[in-house]
Amino acid sequence: MICAGTHEGVHPVMNTILRVSLLTATLVIAASHPAVANDLPSFPFLLVEGKALADVRPDKATLRVYVSAFDPQSSVAAETVQKQLIILLGTLAKHSIPDDAITS
C-alpha cells in the first residue's frame, strides 16, 4: 500500500479522477432537485441563489499496486517483477513521495 502525504505535485490522473468525481456528484445533486421556474409566489418576495466552487488538492491517497510476471522459468519472472518494482519506486521518488510513505 502506498500512502502519500501532502505534496506540491499531484499526478494528473488523480486530478482527473477528482474532477470527474466532483462533476458526477454535482450532476447527481442537480438532477435530484425538481425545477422551480413556475413555482414563484404572486406576492413580493426575495429570491436568493448561490454557488460555491473549491478546487483543492488531495492531501492523502492510497494506491494498491500488484506486480506480477509469468514465465516458465521462475528466475526470469522474478527478475521481471524486480525491474517493474524499481521503475515504480523511481516514479514515486520522481513525484516526491517519501520512502516512509510506502509500505509493502
Image: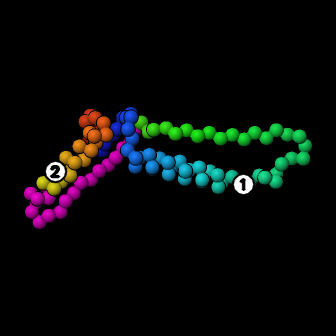
| Rendered image quadrant of residue 47 | top right
* Quadrant (top left, top right, bottom left, bottom right) of the C terminus: top left
Q: Callout 2: 10 Å neighbours few (<14), some, many (20+)?
A: some
N-terminal of the two: label 2 or label 1?
1
Residue 99 placement (x, y as % from top left):
25, 36
Q: Which residues are magenta?
A: 60-78
User: Which residue is drawn at the image coordinates 30% and 44% (left, top)?
Assistant: 1
Q: Secondary structure at mark 1?
A: loop
| Rendered image quadrant of residue 48 | top right
* Most foreground residue, 71 or 56: 56
| Rendered image quadrant of residue 6 | top left
Q: Callout 1: 10 Å neighbours few (<14), some, many (20+)?
A: few
Q: Is residue 102 above or below residue 28?
A: above
Residue 102 placement (x, y as % from top left):
27, 39
Which label sits on residue 82? Answer: 2
Left or right, 54 with respect to 38, comes to left
Q: Is residue 99 above or below residue 16?
A: above
Q: Secondary structure at mark 2?
A: helix
User: Which residue is drawn at the image coordinates 90% and 47% (left, top)?
Assistant: 42
* Most foreground residue, 61 or 88: 88
User: Which residue is drawn at the image coordinates 72% and 41% (left, top)?
Assistant: 49
Does any portion of residue 102 appear in the rendered image? no
User: Which residue is drawn at the image coordinates 27% and 44% (left, top)?
Assistant: 91
Residue 19 placement (x, y as % from top left):
50, 48
**Amino acid type at mark 1:** Pro
- How many numbered marks does the figure carry? 2
Residue 4 placement (x, y as % from top left):
34, 38
> Residue under circle 1?
34
CB of mark 2 within 8 Å of CB of mark 1? no
